[in-house]
Amino acid sequence: MAQIMIIAKEPVAGRVKTRLTPPFSPEQAARLAEAALHDSLIAVSGTPAGQRLLALDGLPGSWLPPGFVVIPQRGSGLDERLAAAFSDAYRLRPEPVVLIGMDTPQVTPALLDEAARALDSRDAVFGPASDGGFWLLGLREPDASLLLGVPMSHPETGKLQLDRLDRAGLSVHLLPELTDVDTPADAPEVAAQAPDSRFAAVLRETGR
């Protein structure tokens, strides 16, 4: 059974979601980040998994539900941190790994379960993001060379990552496109897709 992992930053004001400020204050941006992380953690908790992990930059807080193995992020660039997270999870438990970020509070257990099950028959699973990146990557057998050197936070990150998987000869299952919460304009769009989420509730509290 596949493992499911979230890679995230500790939701501290001034360190997370800085692209949301302004119009949001650093404190509001951190609250939105914590809410998005909470919703993502709850979705993972509700999905059958061999193991649930959090690859964390920072320290866990009261927002972390039980049942997660916390591992520290390693590396400098995002490509290095992603590769290390996959490697560390696979070293702990040599089973397929599904990884998401903390920016898609609209993610559902059904989507995560589809990703995990896809790795029973495919080498990889890929969830494209509307900004050109990706919101999910799953690998049956993680290999750092599949990630290292892929430009991150680039308009074609998703295409370049998918090309890397294709060039490696991997069979890939594609998931629906989702929107990451990266900019102020993304927040109401995502909240509308998940109106009952904590993220949507916190956004309403900000008055925006």
Image (cartoon, rainbow, N blue to C red):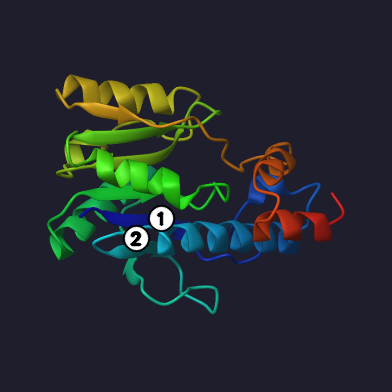
Disc number for residue 112? none
Residue position marked by numbered label 1 in the rendering? 7
Q: Rounded to the nearest whole Å, what is the CA distance between mark 1 and mark 2?
A: 8 Å
- Residue neighbourhood size for the residue with mark 1, other residues' Cα within 10 Å, grouped as few (<14), some (14–19), many (≥20): many
Residue 70 picture quarter: bottom left
Residue 2 seen anywhere in this rendered image of the structure: yes
Discs 1, 2 touching: Cβ within 8 Å: yes
Q: Amino acid at mark 1?
A: Ile
Q: At 29% from the left edge and 20% from the top edge, which residue is drawn? A: 163
Q: Position of residue 4 (x, y in %)?
A: 32, 55
At 22% from the left and 21% from the top, the residue drawn is 166
Q: Nearer the viewer, residue 172 or 102?
A: 172
Q: Which residue is mark 2?
A: 73
- Crowdedness of circle 2 by 10 Å Cα count: few (<14), some, many (20+)? many
Residue kind at label 2, given as amino acid type: Gln
Residue name at image x 33 percent, y 64 percent = 53
Residue extending furthest toward the right: 207
Q: Nearer the viewer, residue 130 or 77?
A: 130
Q: In this rendering, would 205 be left or right of 113?
A: right
Figure check: 190 above or below 70:
above
Element type at marker 2? loop
Q: Report the side of 159 relative to 86 (left or right).
A: right
- For marks 1 and 2 on the same chain, the one whose residue lies earlier in the sequence: 1
The x, y position of residue 6, in whole percent, is 40, 56
Location of residue 73 in the rendering, given as x and y in whole percent from the top left corner: 34, 60
Q: Is residue 144 above or below residue 59?
A: above
